[in-house]
Amino acid sequence: MSGQTLTDRIAAAQYSLTGSEVARAVCKATTHEQTAPKKKHLEYLIEATKESNVNIPQMADTLFERATNASWVVVFKALITTHHMMVAGNERFLQFLASRNTLFNLSNFLDKTGSHGYDMSTFIRRYSRYLNEKAFAYRQMSFDFGRVKKGAEGVMRTMPVEKLLKGMPTLQSQIDALLEFDVHPNELTNGVINACFLLMFKDLIKLYACYNDGIINVLEKFFQMKRGQCKDGLEIYKRFLTRMTRVSEVFKIAEVKDKPNNTLYC
């Protein structure tokens, strides 16, 4: 499928008539075209989150509305657009999402229009769960693991024991939700799912850096911990080891798809 559909054009025109440029940009970013959301629309929305006169709840509601569409393409692109804004937008956008009791309720989403719809619906359900977990982690920690400072002076490396032992399971849950996307190279068949995978891969790099910092901190403080804390710390370390194989598998997929003859960046 190429080019915007008549439905896309009508929706964009309706938003133009109401004077909502933000809503129009959301609509343009989430067309029925089986390609990644266009960069110019994403950049507009990201910049809009930084404007004090932009209504963040209204912006989010427009994205949520697009995520209720029957088409897997529109819903997937609504999730991708939201993800871009969570990563690169003003933090108040992520703060608002984290303040909601529910974000995306897509656990039963299914586009029955052909086998491609069935296949992509599976990944939409998994992806929405990850974004929900990302927002929940922010609510729990009051910061985004992807944005914090990493390394020897980083947040997870210098975190006090009590907060560390509470924060690491939250980080592990977010990583688990990401790994449960569980896509294989032969399933990265169009620009939409490729755009999603690229975003999640970039998240994984940042989350893994935090995870590694946290584990180093746990090990360095292990012999200073109380008995109960030692038990929690050991459990965190065991979980870390079991996740390493799955993390390396995602890196291998990215390596395969990043070769010149492949199309990860479509």
Image: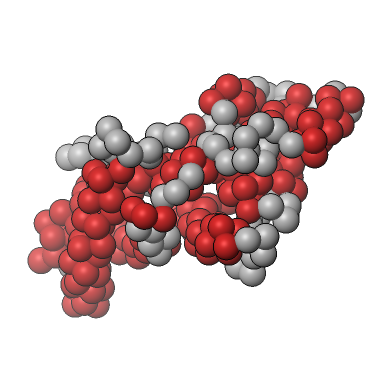
Residue at 80% of width from left, 39% of height from top? 7
**Residue name at image x 13 percent, y 60 percent:** 219
Q: Quadrant of residue 112?
A: bottom right
Where's residue 191, x and y in %? 49, 40
> As drawn, is 78 to the left or to the right of 172?
right
Across and down, in percent, residue 211 comes to 26, 53
Say if residue 106 shows up in the picture: no
Identify the residue at horizontal 66%, vertical 46% (top origin).
74
Q: Is 118 in front, or is 243?
A: 118
Image height of 191 relative to 248, above or below? above
Q: Residue furthest right?
A: 17
Q: Which residue is rendered at x = 57% and y = 62% of the image?
A: 115
Whether residue 189 is visible, yes or no, is yes
> Number of callouts in the render?
0
Q: What quarter of the picture does the C terminus occupy?
A: top left
How is the model colour-coded?
secondary structure
